[in-house]
Image: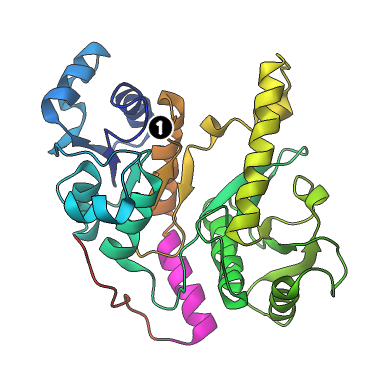
Amino acid sequence: MKIGLDVMGGDFAPEATISGAIIAQRLMGTDDSIVLIGNPEMIKEELTKQGAPEDLFEIVEAYDVIEMDESPTRAFSSKPNSTMGIGFKLLRKKKIDAFASAGNSGAMLVGAIYSVNTIQGIIRPATAAVLPREDGGVNLLIDVGTNPDVRADVMYQFAILGDALAKCVYNIPDPRVGLLNIGHEDKKGNLLAQSVFQMMKESNDFNFIGNVEGRDVLKNKADVIVCDGFTGNILLKSLESVYRIIVKRGINDDYFNRFNYEQYGGTPILGVNSPVIIGHGISNGEAIKNMILLAHQVAKSDLSGKITQAITNYLDVPNGNSDSNQLA
């Protein structure tokens, strides 16, 4: 299995990306490899600095870089030979099994949608975040910012995406799916929440357990918590801010340490035909390592294939890729 890595993705590239790749390669199987995408001379220089042989990785040449502050759509179309552009070309041509980057997340989303395409039947791809529980388990929050404005049917599909993610990557055999709301009663929430609740309540596509309140998101009540991207992003960043305060105050606690983003590496873009992983822009070597290992797990578990089957069963549409226009 081959995992493609955007060597220039992230604020601390290429030092952090190369460092993470070296560690990840040592942890992966002998049949697994990492393909470094970027400036060959820069990559070889950094490998030498870090004491790794140049032949440890396959290197694919790419000199352009999509910067963090560039417009995603414009940059992706105007820089087809950027590290991201080349990465998606390799993924689309099946020369790599997954592609990961800690670079411009908007450009990664654009590339995923227009290069490898959205799975047929998926209205909008989504992203999820891991929320550590005090009992040692994890909850998955979906969506966390990809879709600030959604319809009820889109949120229903988030449940299907989250259910597949929980099963394939986090080995939860029968995930409990909850809807984030302001109360646990059936009629609680705004019109959107009430509409989604009714759709989920009548569903056989996943194990819906009802509404989940904000105070329960870190408890063992639901494995997958569904919300719109606007709400999910606010919740996620609120939790991140609390973690930063804890670190700033010098509090060392095993549970709170699990809120460190480095442990999770990134998030897959759920609902596209091939594994695409977005990492945090400030990723260090540890985070990059975990992003690569997550990409490997997503590809190995055939998450995209499982989502395709689930959405096919839901919509009763024939298998196959969408007809989205390709930019690369």
Side of 262 relative to 135 (left or right): left
Give the residue at x 60% y 56%: 230
Which quarter of the figure has residue 196?
bottom right
| Residue 31 appears in view | no
Q: In this view, does 210 lie above or below 216?
A: below
Question: Is 11 above or below relative to 175?
Answer: above
Residue 127, magenta (yes or no): no
Q: Can residue 56 be seen in this view?
A: yes
Magenta stretch, main secondary structure class: helix
Residue 310 percent across, percent down from the top left: 51, 74
The quadrant of the image that shows the C terminus is bottom left
Task: Read off the magenta span.
Answer: 303-317
Residue type indicated by callout 1? Ile
Residue 103 lies, in percent from the top left, at: 35, 39
Residue 154: give x, y in percent of width and height.
Answer: 56, 72
Q: Can you identify the residue that label 1 sits on? A: 288
Quarter of the image where one finds residue 202: bottom right
Left or right placement of residue 295 versus residue 30 in this view = right
